[in-house]
Image (tube, grey):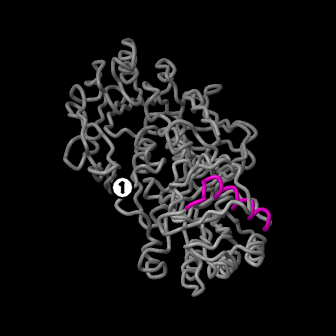
Amino acid sequence: MGAPPPTSIRQFDIGSVHRLAVLVTDPDSGWLGLARGLKAHGIPFTMTTSVAKALQHKVVFVYPTISGRALPAPAFAALAEHVHAGGSLLAFDVEGGGLAPLFGVAAAPTAVREDVVDWPSTGSDRGGQTRISRSGTEASVGAVQYQPTTGETLAHYASGGAALVCHRAGGRACAFGVDLGALSARAYNGRVEGIAQSYVNSYEPSLDTLYDWLAAFYTAGEPMPWLIGTAPAGRSVSIILSHDVDSVPAIAAARDSADAISAAGAKGTFFVQTKYVRDFNDSPFFDKAAAQTFSAIARQGMELGSHSVAHAQSFKAFPFGTGEERYPNYRPFVESRTSARGGSILGELRISKFLLETLTPATVRSFRAGYLSNPFRLPDGLAAAGYRFDSSITANSTLSHYPFQLTYGRADNALAPAYEFPVTIEDEAAPGLIQRRDLEFAVIDKIAERHGLVVVLVHPDAAGVKLSFERDLLRRWQGRAWFASLGDYGAWWRARSEFEPDIVEANGGWRLVAPRSDARDITLILPKVKSIAAGPGAAFARGVLTLAHSPNTPLILNPQ
């Protein structure tokens, strides 16, 4: 398998002048991580290397640096004039060009190692902390500190230094010392697991907090902004009840879970280990009888996904494979808790998918690695084997409670045609799920405030204790949450991510236009719109436009 072509900045050079403009001054920076984060959080944007094109927009994010090395001399005067004329300008690293007074800071920032950004309480905002690094570990991420002069410090590092400084000079210029693109890339690529205070079963939305601020900066400075909602229309949150079926007792218990989910009018996902080799882990259990059980579960409307063949903790160290792996000659053997032989990433993906699709009515689109063991080339294998959705990392490990698009090699070079859906709550920590039910429900409440995603990982058990948790969860959130399979939710999220509406000025007014799309039940947040001449399949209330499908004609917007 050859190296994929790198994703180009030009791919994101789209849309009207009412999007956030990202002026990329260094093509070797973390701009692709920034693009993935903007997509996930529903902030409309365009990316360009042209100063003139960026300055057609009211809100401009110069990334990653403002310096004489990165920009021609005339650009500095143009950026200053943009702010003086009422525009908004954001930068990470303001090194030169004489623009320090524009941002209200002293000359150049100082490189620092800081772990936390503190946000003060303002009005209804309770403030809080954002974790951006962990000193002394591989998750250590650099930042810069500003010395404010005439600017207002809006956020501090834990040491007291200024992390975010803003200054008004006609418009608004802000200098933010966190490299949001690089942090996003490392988080989405599973390379900052040490930053979060806990691995799973809690709520640590550090990345989401930073993008919330960026969304607010964009909407404040743009005369007609919009944001794409992160939950389906009419729902506060999306919940995926996922089940790892990787033992003999779990097979029968999985049927009970499917019955309960079906009775509630919901759907779930069952990740099935197609084990046919006796080894350290267990005896073979994926046989005709098991296939009949899973077929019955599929006929109830549940999704069957792959949970690999070997379920090896050492999967993250498996070789990529050749693509020539075939059943029954492919025989991975787990030797101990930490070692296995004879396996490959492509073998685990391809053979498990083949067996499930051959012996059940399933079309397999989703994968979860055993032990959430996540090799760097897993996205490459997912793409090659025809998977589109993965759930092999925790939300806290990505600092975010939204899905995101994967990249080949879990590196920041080329987008892969697969999305990640991180695990929020799992069942193996002590005490058991039912004992910590109220704590986990509180986590879901917090995620619902941001209309995020909750993936629950359950190993079905014969005692039915975990099933009690699922039933309580279904009752608690019925009608407010979308209980979907990973495949169904993934298809919705992918269509939402590819949906590119735009606001344009026409005939002295504003119009919302949207291309034909598979997106359904999408919401657009329009904070500066009072009313809309909405057509069929569209409704507007309290600043939120609900689209049952892409509008066939432009919608006329009436500003406040």
**63 lies left or right of 373:** left
How many other residues sit within 10 Å of disc 1, few (<14), some (14-19) or many (≥20)? some
Instruction: Name the spot of residue 412 as percent of width and height, x first.
Output: 49, 38
Q: Is residue 150 visible?
A: yes
Q: Is residue 268 visible?
A: no
- Residue 128 sits above or below residue 428 on the image: above
**117 lies left or right of 473:** left
Q: Quadrant of residue 90?
A: top left
Q: Quadrant of residue 456?
A: bottom right
Residue beneath disc 1:
194
The span picked out in magenta is 341-360
Q: Quadrant of residue 488?
A: bottom right
Instruction: Name the spot of residue 437 as percent of width and height, x first.
Output: 47, 77
- Residue 403 sits above or below residue 163 on the image: below
Q: Is residue 534 magenta?
A: no
Residue at image coords 73%, 56%: 326
Q: Is residue 356 magenta?
A: yes
Front residue of 194/340: it is: 340
Instruction: Name the spot of residue 414 as percent of width and height, x first.
Output: 56, 37
Q: Secondary structure at mark 1?
A: loop
Residue at image coords 67%, 52%: 387
Q: Looking at the magenta stretch, what is its main secondary structure?
A: helix
